[in-house]
């Protein structure tokens, strides 16, 4: 049964043995269907209770693109817990297997905060290319200047071509503009091998103006009370 599957994360698409388990929180809905990009068929998710829906699909894995259909709505919604949006925040989500990357930083033991020299880095404007790979090529120069820790500005995917990190709408998906999730991992991997720690600046208190589909799944993500709004 689905309840016997051992997931690491509460929601999202998780690669397990022989397939992928999809789980979404949609208390606003009575029915959730999964749509795989390579097929026009809709796969119904099982209602677990407490607003959760899930299904296990055999024979698929890393790289599979998918979306959700909610009740009788014919719109293809991306996963609120998507790990990657290769075609942007309005497109299909992509299954990502984080276990597929082979790390090379076994000697990395972490650092203590005291005594660190922190460099705040915005990947989109740190280099002309604005990608993880191009930023990675510049890391040795930061080491030479005495930098010991990188604070990467928010990378959650957003709509459009430019953002400062405060307009993200896919909190689990690093923006496709900087590269793939594995490019992100390789950047951190290389930084560790050079003796650089990496911390991530995150924004969880508001969404960007477009591409925020969480309201289609649940009314609980965004408050409409004036007292809850930021000034």
Image (spheres, grey):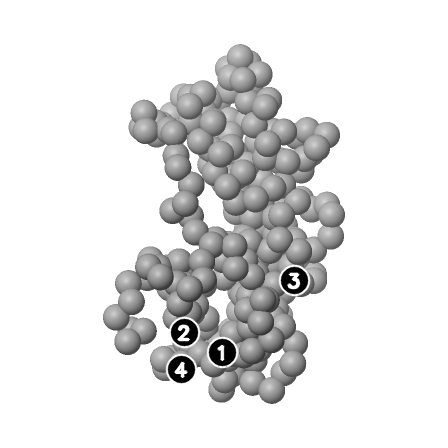
Residue 43 tag number: 1
Which residue carries the number 4 mark? 47
CB contact under 8 Å: marks 1 and 2: yes
Q: How many marks?
A: 4
Query: Distance between the Cα atoms at labels 2 and 3?
Result: 21 Å
Q: Nearer the viewer, mark 4 or mark 1?
A: 1
Marks 4/1: CA distance? 13 Å
Gap between marks 1 and 2, in whole Å?
8 Å
Residue drawn at (52%, 59%) of the image: 64
Distance between mark 3 and mark 1 Cα atoms: 19 Å
Q: Nearer the viewer, residue 133 or 102?
A: 102
Q: Quadrant of residue 54?
A: bottom left
- On the image, the x and y values in percent for residue 165 come to 62, 46
Q: Secondary structure at mark 2?
A: strand
Element at label 3: loop
On residue 52, the disc is none
For the N terminus, the image quarter is bottom left
> Pointer 3 and pointer 1: residues touching (CB < 8 Å)?
no
Numbered disc in front, either 4 or 2: 2
Q: In the image, 176: left or right of 102?
A: right
Asked whether residue 225 appears in the rendered view, the answer is no
In this picture, residue 82 sits left or right of residue 2: right
Q: Quadrant of residue 126?
A: top right
Extreme residue toward the top, this view: 144
Which one is in front, 47 or 38? 38
**Counting other residues with Cα less than 10 Å from the Cα at mark 3, is it few (<14), some (14-19), or many (20 or more)?**
some
Identify the residue at horizontal 64%, vertical 36% (top origin).
131
């Amino acid at each position: 049964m689905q309840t016997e599957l051992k997931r690491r994360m509460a929601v999202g698409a998780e690669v397990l043995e022989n397939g992928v388990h999809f789980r979404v929180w949609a208390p606003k809905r009575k029915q959730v269907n999964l749509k795989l990009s390579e097929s026009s068929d809709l796969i119904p998710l099982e209602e677990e209770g407490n607003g959760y829906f899930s299904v296990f699909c055999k024979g698929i894995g890393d790289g599979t693109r998918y979306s959700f259909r909610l009740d009788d709505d014919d719109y293809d919604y991306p996963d609120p817990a998507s790990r990657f949006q290769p075609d942007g925040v309005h497109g299909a989500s992509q299954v990502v297997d984080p276990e597929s990357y082979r790390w090379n930083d076994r000697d990395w033991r972490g650092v203590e905060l005291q005594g660190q020299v922190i460099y705040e880095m915005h990947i989109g404007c740190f280099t002309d290319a604005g990608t993880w790979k191009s930023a990675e090529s510049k890391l040795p120069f930061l080491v030479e200047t005495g930098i010991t820790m990188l604070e990467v500005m928010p990378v959650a995917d957003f709509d459009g071509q430019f953002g400062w990190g405060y307009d993200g709408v896919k909190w689990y998906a690093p923006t496709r503009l900087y590269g793939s999730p594995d490019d992100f991992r390789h950047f951190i991997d290389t930084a560790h091998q050079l003796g650089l720690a990496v911390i991530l600046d995150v924004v969880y208190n508001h969404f960007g103006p477009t591409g925020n589909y969480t309201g289609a799944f649940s009314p609980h993500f965004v408050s409409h009370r004036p007292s809850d709004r930021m000034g």
